Image (cartoon, rainbow, N blue to C red):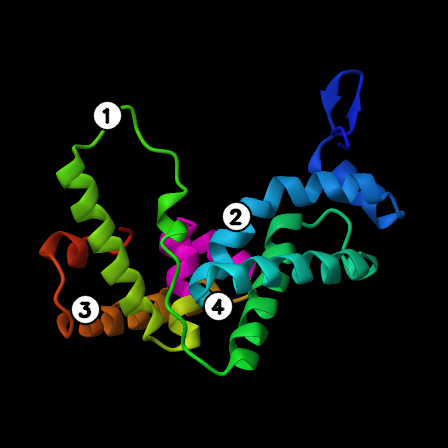
Amino acid sequence: MVKNHSVGGRPLEETELVERARNGDVHAYEDLVRRYQEVAVRLAYPIVGAPGEAEDAVQDAFVKAFYALGRFRSGMPFRPWLLRIVTNEARNRRKAAGRRARLALQVAQDRPSGDAVPSPEASVLEEEQRQMLLAAVNRMGEKDRVVIAYRYFLEMSEEEMAKSLGWARGTVKSRLSRAMKRLRGVLSEVEMPEEAKENPRG
């Protein structure tokens, strides 16, 4: 197993890892991959619609990002740049698949839980809500799925979304507003508990 890069016992900062990776240090890039693997998969799930394809999309995106490091601007935030590549790869994979697969429940299930342990009944209800919510999101168009994934599955602010998607903040706000309006319309067509309709994060 490759150990994390460090200097004097401290982990390297992201900017240092990026610069080393740009200079051909594969191990430094592996550290970056480990840092962003989970968030990249969580982003790809709602866009692609299937767990295996989402993981493949992320893997391909990381490979493409490595070979594109020469075009990365030094000093710029690495995460938004990387997530744009993940988003594009997930979109392309979804289009190539030519189908609308059901979303995997891991999108919402992999989050760490709080201190309180829910009752079995509450857990079942929560899982049903997630399943119906994700199914509703999967019925929506690509642009809607992307903004909802960034906002609610990754819990990004509008400012973070703007940086990651390369959009103006006003564009993010308007597209998110339209996506949520359409999502409420889709939810009104499916049998779903009111709690889930009011809280789209599941």
Between discs 1 and 4, the one toward the N terminus:
4
Tag 1 and tag 4, C-beta contact below 8 Å:
no
Dot 2 crowding, Cα within 10 Å, few <14, some 14–19, many 20+: some
Whole-percent x and y of residue 107? 40, 52
- Secondary structure, magenta segment, majority class: helix
Q: Which of the two marks, 4 or 2, is nearer to us in this view?
A: 4
Left or right for 10, reference 121? right
**Mark 1 or mark 2: whose residue is earlier in sequence:** 2
> Could you tell me which secondary element the residue under label 3 belongs to?
helix
Q: Return the residue found at the far top.
A: 8
Q: Give the crowd class for mark 3: few <14, some 14-19, many >=20 residues within 10 Å.
A: many
- Asked if residue 128 can be seen in this view, the reply is yes
Q: Earlier in the sequence, mark 4 or mark 3?
A: 4
Relative height, residue 120 to residue 71 (above, below): above
Please tell me whether mark 1 sits on a helix, a strand or a loop.
Answer: loop
In the image as oriented, which residue stretches furthest toward the bottom?
98
Residue type at mark 2? Answer: Val
Question: Distance of mark 3 from mark 1, alpha carbons?
Answer: 29 Å
Q: Gap between marks 1 and 2, in whole Å? A: 24 Å
Residue 116 is labelled as 1
Instruction: Give the label on residue 187, or none.
Output: 3
Q: Report the disc number at residue 175.
A: none
Q: Range of the magenta residues?
A: 147-164
Q: Amino acid at mark 1?
A: Ala
Q: Residue at x 13, y 40 (%)?
A: 121
In 3D space, how far apart are the residues under numbered discs 1 and 4 (Cα atoms)?
A: 32 Å
Q: Position of residue 179 (x, y in %)?
A: 32, 70
Residue placed under numbered mark 2 in the picture: 39
Give me the residue at 13% from left, 52% from top. Answer: 195
Contact (Cβ within 8 Å) of mark 2 with mark 3:
no
Whole-angstrom CA distance, mark 4 to mark 2, is 14 Å
